Image (tube, rainbow, N blue to C red):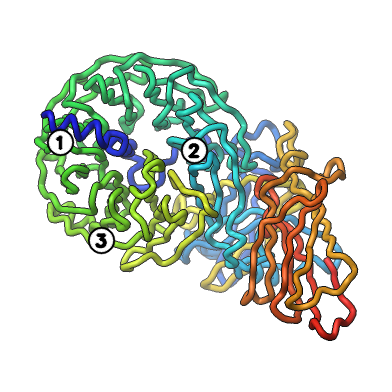
Amino acid sequence: MENLQVAWILVGGILLASQVCAEQLLAQPKVAPSRDAVVTQGTTLGQTQQFEQDGVRIEFSLRTIESQGKQEAQVGQTALAEFSLRDSRTGQPLFIGKPKAWMNARLSETVSTERSCTDKIRSLASGQLGSRPDVDLNSYTIATLNHDRTITFINPHVAFAPTKLEHIISLPGTGTDWLLTRDGRVLYVTLSDEDAVAVIDTTTHQLIQTISTGAGSRPTRVAFQPDGHAVWVGLDGMAQVAALDPETHSITKTLAVGEGPHTLVFSDESAYLAVTNGLANTVSVIDLRTATVIANIASDKTPVTLAYGSAAKRFYVGSLNGNAIGVIDPAAARVVATIPTQPGVVALRFEPTGRFAVFVNQLASTLSVVDTATNAVIGSTMVVKDPDQLTFTQRYAYVRGIESEKFSLIDLADLRRGKPAPVDIQAGQHAPSTAPDQLGIADMIVPAPEGNAVMVANAPDQTLYFYQEGMMAPMGTFSNYKRMPRGILILDRSLKEVSPGVYRAPVTFPKAGRYDVPLLIDRPRTMHCFQVSVQESVNGASTAPGTRPPIVRAQFGNAPIQARVPTAIGFLLIDPTTQQPIVGIRDVQVLLFEPPGTWQQRQHAREVEPGRYAITQSFPHPGEYRVMVQTASRHLRYTDGTAVMQQVVPATTPPNQQTRR
């Protein structure tokens, strides 16, 4: 026992860095079922639009989540876009695959610059630079919680790599854990070092509120009540948990529990919340119907991980310094069974069926499987060294090890038979432990919306890896722009099939006006553009000055730009409301490339005069180049602006320069 206590002291910060979620969240990124997400009825904005071709009838409608008596969509308001595919003769649903759809503000109703529907669809489907829609109903965004008090938003679907960074949000503290509402609108981030919880609006990419949890409270883990009525936060600096109202983002209740650290898990019907109290060696059971603690149940030493089995209707508790997994019946508020283990259990989760509990032992570097029908371990195996996190897709289990640059991949069919057979897959150049200060509790492996892939965040590499199941190495990498990720999640707002032949997605419009809604079906090949109108927000949300990107004015001078000659390239960044130069921007980036993109460079610009930013650049040979500007802090992306086309002339024969916007 003395050796166990030494292990706890020496590696406690690492051993406690294990993330456990409720069973219903195990097979997906950590997201919460917001009240908006479960709404199926709403006010139809205008009439349902129809289009028929080759025996396919397409119906498109836009519904508000909260109508407030409005008959048109508003900027900043989330609505539900719905497409129904049916046989035009029988009216039966068609199973012809998910359509692709976009929403783009129209340039004009009359002028020649407004392209045909077919041209718009071909351009949008290409994914190329300059072909980004205002609302994309097909893609998702990667968010990373970073070491430098920022959150980055990365679009993995942009074809040209330097444009993938979409936004950066600065936090008032270092993020510890986070939670995304299921509609993707709100992100809660615990800031342990600031005793606060940050609330992020992901549609405007702004910090909208910071909730103080009290001096010395150290908010750590955060979980969303399945019925959407509360956000719960474990206060590791106190023997308490706090409930937040998801509408007002205010603390509505605090409950006394045991001394933390705390892990929070719900029963799937929102009847009970179980909370581990690591230093008190207890588990608190809270009746959510009365919001009261009904029991503090003694557990094995140092309970740190907890999960709910939907098949057994029981909580399963793993202990770092104990010798058993405890099985708790929440209705009876007592331990009803124990499962022998060895000390070192740091993560326990249920695979997607909810029957088999899977846990990892960090001291032994093993994974074990429990069949909750018998409450017995049916199989164990060695995995990557010092495992600390588990993630599931529908077919595989993923195990991260803090002392390995690989992850273990296990077929769930083998796991359910009690014969787990891991395969170790390379996931970076460095083990997580090489950046020990960045070892945290947020998930570092999350399922991708494709269903057969995951995203893996590697802090020492400052890189994200895309792994597709069946491969022996990652299929792609994404830079995290010199930031070390402490967590990763997916913001998926793409179309989902909600019933046979019916596809739905939440949409939030960035600006007012008339929008085309191009739709593409592969087979039979069908293209059509619907239209919707969007009003300015009545509550002021939207095209507000604070979120409008700056105006970029190129200042390249009058002299011809010669190949292989270093040349100053400058820009004025103008506030669109005040028309004054914007000073003090520190993240201005300049992208230079020669179409179709075989040569490209990116530089950070410096402020040389108030509001004027510049780089020094030489071009490799004569030709026509494109120059673009980005500043994530001011909501300007490369894809939002207009490329400056710059002619570069030979150094020995400088003809007239031709520069245009």
- Is 328 left, or right, of 483 in this rendering? left
Q: Residues within 10 Å of mark 2 (few under 14, many from 20)?
A: many
The residue pinned by badge 1 equals: 343
Q: Which mark is residue 424?
A: 3
Quick one: 37 or 646, which is closer to the camera?
Answer: 646
Name which of mark 3 and mark 2 comes first in the sequence.
2
> Which three-letter amino acid code belongs to the residue tagged 2?
Thr
Which badge, 1 or 2, comes first in the chain's sequence? 2
Residue contact between numbered discs 3 and 2, judged by CB atoms under 8 Å: no
The x, y position of residue 582, in whole percent, is 79, 44
Count of picture labels? 3
In the rendered view of the protein, which quadrant contains the C terminus? bottom right
User: Considering only order in the chain, which callout, 1 or 3, is on the residue closer to the N terminus?
Assistant: 1
63 over 89 or under it: above or below: above
**Residue at image point 29% right, 54% down:** 404
- Is residue 33 something one can see in this rendering? no
Q: Which mark, by number, is residue 407?
A: none
Badge 1 amino acid: Pro
In depth, the one of 580 and 504 nearer the eye is 580
Mark 3: amino acid: Asp
Check whether the beta carbons of the residues at disc 3 and disc 1 lie within 8 A of each other. no
Residue bearing mark 2: 181
Residue 496 vertical position relative to residue 250 in the rendered view, above or below: below
In whole angstroms, how far apart are the C-alphas of marks 3 and 2? Answer: 32 Å
Mark in the foreground, 3 or 2: 3
Residue for point 69% across, 32% down: 69
Residue 441 spot, x, y in % from top left: 37, 38
